[in-house]
Amino acid sequence: MVELKTGPVTDQHEESRTIVHSVSTSSLKAILSPVEQGIVVIDDCRSLVFANDAALRMLQAGTEDEAFHILMRRVPASIFDQARAQTATVTFLDVSNEERRSLIGIEISFFEELLGTPSYVIFMNDFSKWRELDDLHSRFATYLSHHLRTPLTAVRNAMRILSQEEKPLEKTEHDKLLDIGWRNVEKLITSLDEIQKIFMIESEEMNVCRTLVRANREMKPLLDDLECQGKIRGYKLKTPDITIFAGRSRLHDFVRTAVDAYWKWMDEAPFIECVYSIREDMHFVGDDHRMLKISLRPRFHVQSGRTRGRLKDFLSYHEAHRGLVLTRIAMALDGEIDIDSKDTVSLLIPFDPPFNREKDLVHPIHVMIERAGLTGCQFHLTAMRMVGEMTFDGRFKKQLEECLCRSIGSDGMVSMGEEPLSYSIFVINRSLEEVAGLMKGIHQHFIRACSESGEEIYPSIRWEVRYSYTPSTDGSTIETSLLEDICS
């Protein structure tokens, strides 16, 4: 009776193992087939289970059996014994034919119960990819040589001809050489900007000098300049008068990079529509997160057609570096980028970002000290804050920021202060007496604005000079307050 019971049970057990082995093999095949790394699975009897497409491509084989025979013929049998003993099992194959030569790295692992039975898994890596990387480096060097050396050579030749005094040139030739020199200098600057952005992304150095700006007054001169340069064929600006803390230079970089991306994508100078809007997101904790949304979209010609594909796909594959630059600039502005299905590029910047010592104090003060040193003029850092009635602080904040934007010209900048409703004002090319007059003028403008808006109770303004820098005649500097204390 024992034998009668044992027979059917044993047969049923073997049948179950066969079914499990079959299901596991098909599942493993489905998982490993699309993997880019070459993979070959061999059972304990050194018979082929399967090989994925990447393995066939690396071994330059037409079928799985052909790939298996290449491995068995080229890989020493001792490698499999080492893998079974759980020791390091790595070797290399030099696979070549008339068209291609590849160096393949082989790594073999042994698994006791991979498919219900002991199995070997062979992993393959194509080291010829490193050669492709070397080719990329070579092409990059060639690109640099073409885009940097060629303009430099043209400028040098033009300047050499212009500097020949023994044979003065006619006005037409003189103007032509100047035009050659100017155009090639512009090409050189553009190429250097591209390289700088790429390396800044690699080193994650996309810091900004954050300052108070009026968005519409920043955008109009920028778009005018782009139109004069021929990078856009026109624009339509629909922007309210909004003040926001942002990096002015990075904001300009974002717009210029977006325009360049449109140019490449459309293969022509675009007509740009620039629209501002405010997006408000209500968080679960109840606070409201407001962001300024700057949207840039092209206006297409009727005859241009839609065969170019989507801008988002274009910036993901064909011009991926431009998409990366746009994303990193948005991150540096504490914002985010959005490209919708209508090919509109939008930059979202928070209205009330948290104070950042590097962006709002340390970086601006070093920039302004450098400007003051180059021009040989004084520099003063003034701290200003609102004190008193704060019931309608949002409205008072808007009025004070408008007064600051009207009063601070190109010789100064305004950054966010460390305390709530406070500001750091950086001013160069003015004496302490002139700075005091400037602060009093801002205070008077603020009081007048509050009175004209019907406010009966409004906060007062307090200010103090925190740091001064004055170049002296002997080349040294006279400083009040310690820079290290401010920047620490």
Image (spheres, rainbow, N blue to C red):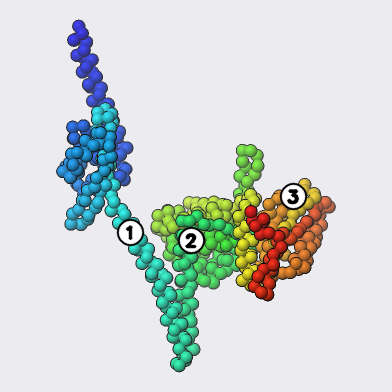
For discs 1 and 2, the disc positioned in front in the rendered view: 1
Give the mark nearest the N terminus, 1 or 2. 1
Please state the horizontal and vertical placement of residue 207, each as a whole percent of the image. Answer: 56, 57
Seen from the viewer's position, the closer of residues 67 and 345 is: 67
| Residue shown at 81% from the left, 57% from the top | 451
Horizontally, is 31 left or right of 487 in the view? left
Give the farthest residue toward the right.
456
* As drawn, 107 above or below 376: above
Identify the residue position indicated by label 1 in the image.
Answer: 134
Label 1 packing within 10 angstroms: few (<14), some (14-19), many (20+): few
SS state under label 2: helix
Q: Quick check: marks 1 and 2 in contact, CB under 8 Å?
A: no
First in sequence, mark 2 or 3: give its number: 2
Q: CA distance from mark 2 to mark 3?
A: 39 Å
Rounded to the nearest angstrom, the CA distance separating label 1 from label 3 is: 59 Å
* Residue carrying label 2: 197
**First of labels 1, 3 by sequence position:** 1
Residue 111 image point, x, y percent? 28, 32
Task: Describe the element under mark 1 as helix, strand or loop.
Answer: helix
Q: Quadrant of residue 140?
A: bottom left
Q: Could you say which disc has been placed on residue 393 in the image?
A: 3
* Rendered location of residue 311, percent (x, y): 45, 56
Residue type, numbered disc 1: Asp
Q: Quadrant of the rendered structure where residue 76 is?
A: top left
